[in-house]
Amino acid sequence: MNNKEAIAKILAKQTKLKEDEILSILEVPSNPELGDIAFPCFKLSSIYKKNPIEIAKELESKIKITKDLEKIKATGPYLNFFLEKSNLAIEVIKKILKEKEKFGTEKNKQTIMIEFPSPNTNKPLHLGHLRNMSLGESVSRILEHKGNKIIRANLNNDRGVHICKSMYAYEKWGKNKTPESEKIKSDHLIGDYYVMFSKAAKENPALEEEAQKILQKWESGDKKTIALWKKMNKWAFDGFKETYKLFGIKHDKQYYESEIYGQGKELAQEGLNKNIFIKKDNAIIADLTDEKLGEKVILRADGTSIYITQDMYLAILKDKEYKLDGSIYVVANEQDYHFQVLFTILKKFGYKFTKNLHHLSYGMVELPEGRMKSREGTVVDADDLILETQKLAKTEIKKRFPKLSEKELNIRSLKIALSAIKFMLLKTDHVKNIIFNPNEAISFEGDTGPYIQYSYARASSILKKSKKKPEIKLTSKILKEKEILLIKKLAEFPEVIENAQRNLSPSIISNYTLELAHIFNEFYHQTKVLDSENEIFLLALVESFRIVCKKSLYLLGIETVEEM
Ligand code: ARG
């Protein structure tokens, strides 16, 4: 039984309200000085036809103090309950120290696929992909923590007109250059040709048709085209692999558009036969005007497959292979329309699994300088951003630990850089657009990942310095304000995760972790743990903070460092 339930039970005995009714109106006062739980007396006022202020006063005198209740106080129309903190403290800390990183877990046992970041193979991963991967990995970990089986999947959009553009440019201007000859990361080389194409096509729009011609050749199996495609795609994949590794992403399943687009085309035909689609100017079209989604091309007039063609089949394949209870697509909100159309079409085909599909749509990432465009070559490449941020971290670490070995410096600076990037990308509600400022992200102060890592390291150092062992034993029952605040915040953790899971929202955990770190730092400044009266208990409290802080960061895909 939790505190609210216990209080509801007490109140039910004294009033005409049922426990459930009471539970639904109990509040947590925003000002902790007013108490831990408040019971508003307005409802009773209409039942007893009495002033709620009087009712609160009467209840105050009737209810007896128990060992879990420190005091009860009527304040205006509210009856405020103050819980006995030392008991609460002991219960919470006991639970955290016992369950450790399993604190707040459940056994949901659903099988859920999360697909991210699913790049196109014509250019390297950019800052937008970093937001995508941060979200995808964090949501995976949150759902895993709740006991689900997660399959991390990646769709490689490895064919289509976009890659034909890079291919065209490479053939025309590439002079057989290779990543080795140019000493450049292989996916960056492809990106350069994509930009080259886009610039040239701006001057000469006829080039767009040239790219489309290459696509037709590719679909008809032209040997030379396929060979070039293979060579360039390999460069893309090799490059992506490195970036995933650097960012800490591992997939359980890879899908390739080139392997499934054929079945997608068959589906387009099947939809036509079943009158789900219509033919218009030789193209196959879904008429979704009734659904207010307009008309959507499913297969081009020249017979070539497009983005949505393969996605229809992919959804079916995923469900067939894994019998999924849920399937989440982490994709930017530019594609909201695409997924509305996709899910509507699958429903028309009658696939029951459609109800399990979910587009986790997120906003754009902009730089302080403005919007990025891949085509114009004004994007920030993921690799560059990570390495630049790592440089900033190194400078900061060197100031504090000038004698650190090169190896340790590399490991630590990467952990801090990734924390800076991931936290910055996750702390804002994912539906919103964000402006990413690397210098702000890396700061050890402020609302940043490194600030939280720093708080964690501080906790570790307290434990290292003490000669005593943490124990759940209070010498003095009087706890200080910040100690109580910290305990209360730790107790919120399971509810926070629950909330984050329900909303598929890592930002809820980010904000919680930030508040937790703030409170810990206030506690740190107020309380001298070492040699204090309650030292062994406070050590247990610090250890609990470490456990919950580490787990929260883990759920955000962020690692801790022991010294900062
Ligand atoms: N490759 C696409 C892009 O870069 C995203 C793919 C998302 N996944 C999907 N199943 N459609 O825009």
Image (spheres, rainbow, N blue to C red):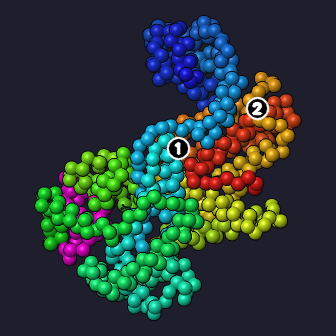
Can you give x and y, in whole percent of width and height, for residue 130 in the image? 52, 63
Looking at the rendered structure, the number of numbered marks drawn on it comes to 2
Q: Is residue 366 above or below residue 141?
A: below
How crowded is the residue under tag 1: few (<14 C-alpha within 10 Å), some, or many (20+)?
Answer: many
For the N terminus, the quadrant is top right
Amino acid type indicated by mark 2? Glu
Residue positioned 73% across, 33% down in the render: 483
Q: Quadrant of residue 304?
A: bottom left
Frontmost residue, 394 versus 145: 145
Amino acid type indicated by mark 1? His
Frontmost residue, 178 versus 442: 178
For the C terminus, the quadrant is bottom right
Q: Which residue in the protein does label 1 denote?
A: 145
**Whole-number angstrom distance, CA of label 1 to CA of label 2:** 27 Å
Point out the stretch of residues depicted in magenta: 286-312
State yes or no: residue 305 in magenta: yes
Q: Is residue 15 above or below residue 526?
A: above
Q: Which residue in the protein does label 2 denote?
A: 471
Can you give x and y, in whole percent of width and height, for residue 513 in the image? 62, 45
Q: Quadrant of residue 158?
A: bottom left
Secondary structure under badge 2? loop
Secondary structure under badge 1? helix
State yes or no: residue 499 in magenta: no
Residue positioned 61% across, 49% down in the render: 553
Can you give x and y, in whole percent of width and height, for residue 188 in the image? 51, 78
Residue positioned 45% across, 39% down in the render: 108
Is any part of residue 556 visible from this angle?
yes
Q: Is residue 271 above or below residue 516?
A: below
Is any part of residue 124 visible from this angle?
no
Tell which quarter ligand 1 is in.
bottom left
Residue positioned 80% across, 61% down in the render: 400
Can you give x and y, in whole percent of width and height, for residue 537 in the image? 77, 32
